[in-house]
Image (spheres, rainbow, N blue to C red):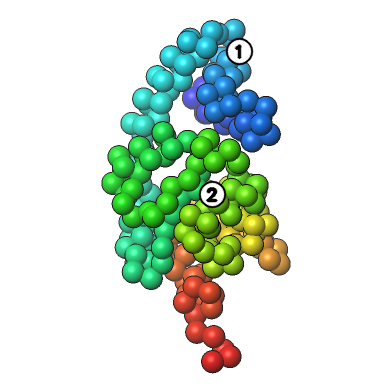
Amino acid sequence: TVEEALVRWREVTDRQWARFAAGETDFQGQRRDRVRMFLDEVLTDAEADAWFDRYIGHYEAAWALFPDVLPVLDLLATSHRHGVLSNSSLLVQDRKLRVLGVRDRFEAVLCAAELGVHKPDAQAFHAACDALGLPPAQVAYVGDHPEIDGRGAVDAGMLSVWIDRGGLGAVERAVAGPHRIASLAELPAILGADTRFGAPSTFG
């Protein structure tokens, strides 16, 4: 079924991304191996590349912003600076942001394929901080994976916010763990409650 295929694709992607993150393969190599493992077939590099290119065409056709994205970006535009850190490549992410019409809202766009380091490694998060010229303690990071994004940003010394749109996280927030939200609409309140991001200091 389609649902089973999607589950299989996500499992394969997670496994190959782990290999990429561990330095066992390069960006193009993990793409090819995702195809081979998903199809369970022996394919040449050219055949795997052609299959992945067809997949990318369908993937790009499905790109869309969640309804809460633009309102929150607009709300925070004058008070907060914005950047993107992705475990993908600039080839994909820069194009995605431009197609969706939001590339000019971000000062910096950094991706693992070019950085040579991947989330949840603290070096990846710190590279994003360096691109903004800010220490980690003055940067909030919002991501959709509880470990790669949520825990990774905490360990890197940032204010971490895990956006759990599917409501998968039933565990209460641990001390010093990532904030959990279901919508970006909840983000301004979190930033506004922190003295690093807008709340007045009680010490004057």
Query: Residue 82 sits in which quadrant?
Result: bottom left
Determine whether, in the image, residue 155 is placed left or right of residue 83.
Answer: right
Above or below, comparing residue 65 to residue 47 in the picture = below
- Please give the label number shown on residue 144: 2
Q: Residue at x 38, y 54 (%)?
A: 106
Name the residue at 42% across, 34% down: 92
Res 11 visible:
no
Point out residue 203 in the picture as x, y percentages from the top left corner: 58, 90
* Mark 2: amino acid: Asp
Up the image or down, 190 lies above or below 37; here it is below
3D distance between C-alphas at marks 1 and 2: 29 Å
Residue at x 49%, y 73% (from the top left corner): 197
Q: Secondary structure at mark 2?
A: loop
Q: Residue furthest right?
A: 175
For label 1, count other residues whose C-alpha is less than 10 Å away and answer few (under 14), some (14-19) or many (20+).
Answer: few
Residue on which disc 1 sits: 40
